[in-house]
Amino acid sequence: MAAEEGQVIGCHTLDSWNDQLKKGNDSKKLVVVDFTASWCGPCRIIAPFLTELAKNFSNVMFLKVDVDELKEVAADWAIEAMPTFMFLKEGTIVDKVVGAKKDELQQTVLKHVGAASTASA
């Protein structure tokens, strides 16, 4: 089991972001990117829930990007509100959840994990 499985990986530099994104794309796993900010109340409220999802879905890669640390990445991804969760498969955006919506976040993970396991079966 990789050290990153079961946890949310914080990307604090452009290099770490590019490296983790490449790992996610190469793994063919679902990648969930949490675009967050330290000053964002809803982001802080949903963070423990995201950690729980990471523990429960070890077959999903969870990344966290602080929009103030990596402004360039946030701009590239057209992030306008926090938190924004982008769902990627092999580098392609397959879904998006805007806001601290626990149920919608979990349902979206389930939807794409289900699709991934069906596709590989």
Image (cartoon, rainbow, N blue to C red):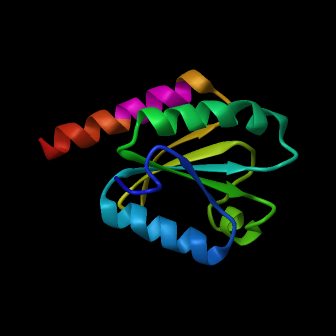
Q: Residue at x 68, y 37 (%)?
A: 47
Number of marks drawn: 0
- Is residue 107 one of those drawn in magenta? yes
Q: Choose top left, top right, bottom left or bottom right for residue 42.
A: top right
Q: Where in the figure is residue 108, as x and y percent of width and height?
A: 45, 32
Vertical arrangement, residue 33 with respect to residue 21, above or below? above
Q: Choose top left, top right, bottom left or bottom right for residue 72.
A: bottom right
Vertical arrangement, residue 80 with respect to residue 74, above or below? above
Left or right of 112, for residue 88: right
Q: Nearer the viewer, residue 79 or 13?
A: 13
Q: Residue at x 75, y 58 (%)?
A: 67
Left or right of 61, for residue 77: right
Vertical arrangement, residue 81 with respect to residue 44, above or below? below
Q: Residue furthest bottom?
A: 15
- Is residue 31 one of those drawn in magenta? no
Q: Residue at x 59, y 44 (%)?
A: 85
Left or right of 81, for residue 5: left
Q: Residue at x 38, y 30 (%)?
A: 110
Q: Which residues are magenta?
A: 104-111
Q: Residue furthest right?
A: 39
Task: Locate the C terminus by quadrant.
Answer: top left
Q: Choose top left, top right, bottom left or bottom right for residue 63.
A: bottom right
Q: Main secondary structure of the magenta part?
A: helix
Q: Residue furthest left?
A: 121
Q: Where in the figure is residue 92, as x and y percent of width and height?
A: 41, 59
Q: Where in the figure is residue 24, as x and y percent of width and height?
A: 41, 61
Q: Nearer the viewer, residue 86 or 51?
A: 51
